[in-house]
Image: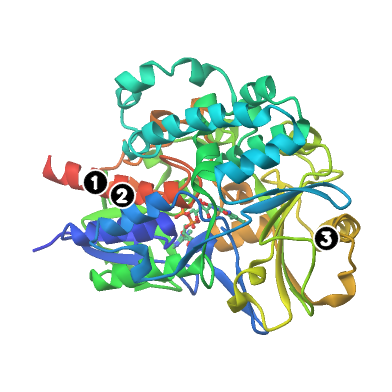
Amino acid sequence: MSKTISIIGSGFSSLAASCYLAKQGYEVTVFEKNSTVGGRARQLKKDGFTFDIGPTWYWMPDVFERFFSDFGKIPADYYQLDKLNPAYSVYFGKDDYVTIEDTIEKICETFETEERGSSKKLKKFINSAQTNYDIAIKDLVYNPGESPLELVTTKTIKKLDQFVSNIKRDVRKDFKNIRLAQILEFPVLFLGAKPSKTPSFYNFMNYADFGIGTFHPKKGMYQVILAMQSLAKELGVKINTNAPVDKIIVEERIAKGIISNGKTYFSDIVLSGADYHHSETLVDKQYRQYSEKYWTKKTFAPSSLLFYVGFDKKLKNVNHHTLFFDVDFDTHAEAIYDEPNWPEEPLFYASFPSITDSYSAPKNKEAGIFLIPLAPGLEDTEDLRELYFKKIIDRFEELTSQDVKNNIIFKESFCVNDFIKDYNSYKGNAYGMANTLLQTAFLRPKLRSRKVKNLFFTGQLTVPGPGVPPSLISGKLVAELINKYQKN
Ligand SMILES: Cc1cc2nc3c(=O)[nH]c(=O)nc-3n(C[C@H](O)[C@H](O)[C@H](O)COP(=O)(O)OP(=O)(O)OC[C@H]3O[C@@H](n4cnc5c(N)ncnc54)[C@H](O)[C@@H]3O)c2cc1C
């Protein structure tokens, strides 16, 4: 008889794990607290508009291809992927922005216009980033973080200096133009820490950005979730929504199942893809591996204040992805990482998917997503949300030279309290635990419980880290680990 597995959560990592485990012959049941699958990547539909609630940047398409190919599929079996051109633009002042196009040659031309001689340095930088991408994303990140030895290869030994230096230092050494430096420092923000705290080795994110490009699944990122849900069902996974897990049953240090909606579900293995901190609260204290003190000492990736806005007209002077870096980056970063507080003048990101994808908004209307990164755990009130919406929408009007306030049909917001309520997120973090040097690979919370047999974890707080591609990889890693420990 096949062994049974209960999986908590239905985010990217849980869905990925469910597919691998079902393929390996386990009988898999997913328990998701919310009414729809997808976790942080859920979808909001309103008045003919469709918004991705969480991730909007589809980077590292090779990771998605690798995932689907493990099941004899390709992404195109489920969704259409378009490469965006331009990839994005970055505002530095009124009517003053840099546009990043879809090939390194075009990006080099843009760099050269900003700073003479910079394209040569850029090519060298991206070549180094590509080497690291090949080492990291094609190989290293597919290790389960069980031992430091996983990181020791002939290739990484030659790169030791890149674990000591950081992205900011490297970029500023070569690029004196502050705008170009900020553009090159932007990709590592996805890893959740300041560029000055992110090892140089992580410049593989720059290759993902400039070398591979930015993609968009037609109808939005949620199509990837739907694809994975379909695949999971094809493989026989049972998915229960509106099924919050209240307890992981442990007897004599062995996981025996879960309790959801008052009902007990016994299984041979329990895997949680919910936030790690929350997952540990589902077992009795003596079975928790990490103390509250452990979590408070960790560098968490930011939370966010988000707005999903329906506009009754098409907007101008913006792209599908537009970043607003017109205020001081370091001051905002200090408010996230050093002295957690609402930033006086926030940087923000805006996405207008309806510019390239008519599915996102009715004809002649625009769907807008606005995101301000914030420190996790901040006070979150309606007044603060309103105050910050006003701050960014005023700036948005000024910077892009257009009136939009009177064209808002509706706006919905999402912030710290919602991350906690909807996902049981630790302090309302949006992107999990940051990838700093001391929070990398074997130094992250473990995929396998050291205190409870047959209890496993996956997701953006464990290995390899935050982001959609790492979450897919996390699901694969934990499935392999479960198989390994079942055989032993
Ligand atoms: C606003 C935002 C923007 C982002 N932008 C990008 C981007 O552009 N590109 C990118 O690559 N990444 C991005 N990310 C990061 C990416 O979305 C995440 O890394 C990824 O979705 C995390 O997946 P996960 O499976 O680890 O966790 P989650 O998606 O959080 O899944 C965990 C699931 O567990 C469920 N759960 C929690 N507690 C329980 C319980 N007790 N019982 C049952 N179920 C429970 C939750 O409801 C949730 O469905 C973004 C994230 C956010 C929030």
> Can you tell which mark lies on residue 463?
none
Residue where numbered disc 1 is placed: 480
Distance between mark 3 and mark 1 Cα atoms:
44 Å
Three-letter amino acid code of the residue under disc 1:
Glu
Which of 466 and 418 lies nearest the eye of the viewer? 466
- Residue matched to label 2: 476
Viewed as shown, does residue 158 lie left or right of 416?
left
The quadrant of the rendering that contains the C terminus is top left
Whole-percent x and y of residue 280?
Answer: 43, 46
Left or right of 405 in this view: 214: left
Type of the residue with mark 3: Phe
* Three-letter residue code for mark 2: Lys
Say what secondary structure mark 2 lies in. helix
Label 2 vs label 3: CA separation? 39 Å
Residue sitting at x 35%, y 39%:
138
Question: Are dots 1 and 2 in contact, CB under 8 Å?
Answer: yes
Query: Which of marks 3 and 2 precedes in the sequence?
Result: 3
Q: Secondary structure at mark 1?
A: helix
Q: Which residue is mark 3?
A: 389
Residue 360 x %, y %: 62, 75
Q: What residue do we see at 67% from left, 69% from top?
A: 355
Q: Quadrant of the N terminus?
A: bottom left
